[in-house]
Image (cartoon, rainbow, N blue to C red):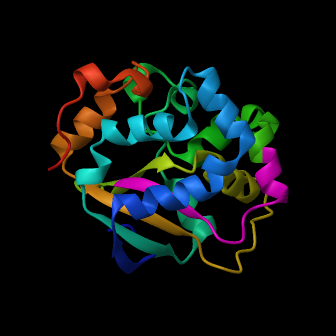
Amino acid sequence: MIKNLVHKSKITWTGIFASWQSHEGQDPAWQALAREKGWESWAAWRENQADAIDAEKREWHIYEITHPNETIPTFLMGPFRGWQRHYPKEEAHTHSVADLVHDHTGWVQENARVHLLQDHFPERTQFIGVYAEEEDAIILFEGHHRAAAVALQVHDGDPLSFFTPPTIALTEMTAEKIRHLRSLLPEDILKVQVKRATLSG
């Protein structure tokens, strides 16, 4: 398991989703984005993404991130075109948030959500990720803007201060399941219902 993570508890996907919905799902900007993408609600949009990895069937655990400025930038970017588009298709899921900040500093600096989080990072926050067992790496599923804000502050030599350690909800996947996860690109993950294979193992 990745260093700087301390196991806290087991949790259901229902609990994870409720926490996600309590912050992002209540944000009018994210609700509007869901409608722009053709979804009737934020919940419908995010539930579809969760279904793509069979999130409800998986075993999840909460970990405390003890050294967030060291650990969070190492998270690999997840299966989302908005983040993966900065690199060639064959490099999907191989670049960390720190790589993105280093290679595309200007884009990250100009991202409005990242900029807002630099100034107003939440006191308590939880990421969602997939632990790739064979690679000993975490692929981020939710929390890219927050991770980018942390990585950018580290890059600029002004790391954030954390009064409450962030947490991450993690599920483990074998190499076979990780390959399927990565196959969701270049297709938009929001349209994978017809090609979805089980990711329960």
Q: Which residue lies furthest to the right in this view?
A: 119
Q: Is residue 49 left or right of residue 54?
A: right
- Residue beneath the point at 51% across and 26% down: 81
Coordinates of residue 41 in the picture (x, y in percent): 56, 34
Quarter assignment of residue 10: bottom left
Can the viewer see residue 164? yes
- Residue beneath the point at 81% across and 35% down: 110
Can the viewer see residue 148? no
Q: Is residue 99 left or right of residue 111?
A: left
User: In terms of depth relative to the viewer, which is nearer, 106 or 126?
Assistant: 126
- Residue beneath the point at 26% across and 57% down: 172
Q: Is residue 196 left or right of residue 61?
A: left
Coordinates of residue 17 in the picture (x, y in percent): 46, 55
**Span of residues in magenta:** 115-130
User: In terms of depth relative to the viewer, which is nearer, 178 or 62?
Assistant: 62
User: In terms of depth relative to the viewer, which is nearer, 165 or 95?
Assistant: 165
Coordinates of residue 82 in the picture (x, y in percent): 58, 28
